[in-house]
Amino acid sequence: MSLSILLQIAQTLIAILLAPLLMGWVNQCRAWLQGRSAPRITQPYRTLKKLFHKDAVIAHNASSLFRFAPYMIFACMALAAGLVPTIVNDLPLSPAADVIALVGIFALARVFQALAAMDIGTAFGSLGARREMLVSFLAEPALLMVFFTASLISHSTQLPIIVQTLAHQTFAIYPSLAFAAVAFWMISVAENARIPVDNPGTHLELTMIHEAMILEYSARHLALIEWAVALKLFTYSVLGIALFVPWGIAAQGDVAALPLALLAMLAKLLLGGAVLAVLETISAKLRLFRAPEFLGTAFLLAVLGMLIHFLLEA
């Protein structure tokens, strides 16, 4: 087995194993900022272990789709995490690491989650699925505009080439990326069901989006979904690193830089998780009807970043 394949497997495993730790770090920082007793940073692992040891309770009218959806959602998030360069660039899956395909993987996981939520026929599941589709309908075009801004700079839609252009070539300041970065943060909190668009810690039927879709799941199915949620947050975090602060990611064939690249990634994730906790603490939950305005602003900022790139290039 070649070194590149081993690195690809290692990068994917690192994402799968560290994703719950990132979620635990964010929860711990939020508790500290709110003056509460903070849970252990390893609490997500304990929760997953407890859920995997329980027996699943499934509604009698659940179809095979309901049972299959958690596995599909987890597989999509694991694949997306493997595509994004985290510690090393240009791995065997790099030819498939197209930003448009990445958006499609996120959309595929969302479709299965929405279908599974409506499969049982409960009011909460259908309500959450409709709200999730509303958010995704507005977030995905904005995410594509963010990607297109970076693609115009690197003249490619492949993530490895974008990272290579931004991190390993002559240093340059791109004002368009500043607007794209703000838009990406707004999209990220919406896609990951974080404040101010959604609150992952509430089950109030008037506000919840993501939690409404998983109320009928339990045991191993719920564990896979919760793990996939952590993986999605991790993937968006490393995606933001690859697009806007890619310095430290090892170039192809630079094995000696791997330890430093791993340390750089961990430091960036710790800082990013702390910043996310601060922003969630000082922000208030938006009314559901304000979510389109929030995501519309993200779309406008992303488009503005593209226009600024065109103007400066001209």
Image (cartoon, rainbow, N blue to C red):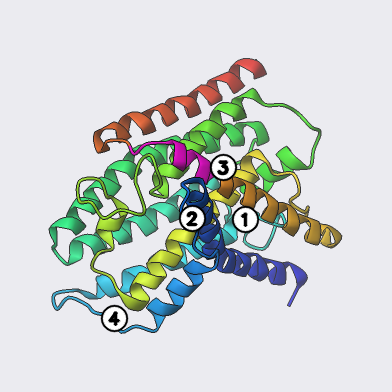
Tell me the element at label 3. helix
On the image, numbered disc 4 is attached to which residue? 56
- Neighbour tally class for label 4: few under 14, some 14-19, many 20 plus, Cα within 10 Å: some
Between disc 1 and disc 4, the foreground one is 4
Say which label, 2 or 4, has the lower sequence index. Answer: 2
Q: What is the quadrant of residue 254 in the picture?
A: bottom right
Residue 254: which numbered mark, if any?
none
Between disc 4 and disc 3, the foreground one is 3
Task: Tell me the residue at 38%/77% (across/down).
Answer: 51
Residue 275: which numbered mark, if any?
3
Q: What x and y, as percent, mark residue 258?
A: 79, 60
* Pointers 1 and 4 in contact (C-beta within 8 Å): no
Query: In front here: 31 or 283?
Result: 31
Amino acid under disc 4: Ala
Amino acid under disc 2: Asn
In the visual, does 215 lie left or right of 30? left
Say which label, 1 or 4, has the lower sequence index. Answer: 4
On the image, numbered disc 1 is attached to which residue? 95
Between disc 1 and disc 2, the foreground one is 2
Amino acid under disc 3: Val
Q: What x and y, as percent, mark residue 271?
A: 63, 47
Amino acid under disc 1: Pro
- What stretch of residues is rendered in magenta? 276-285
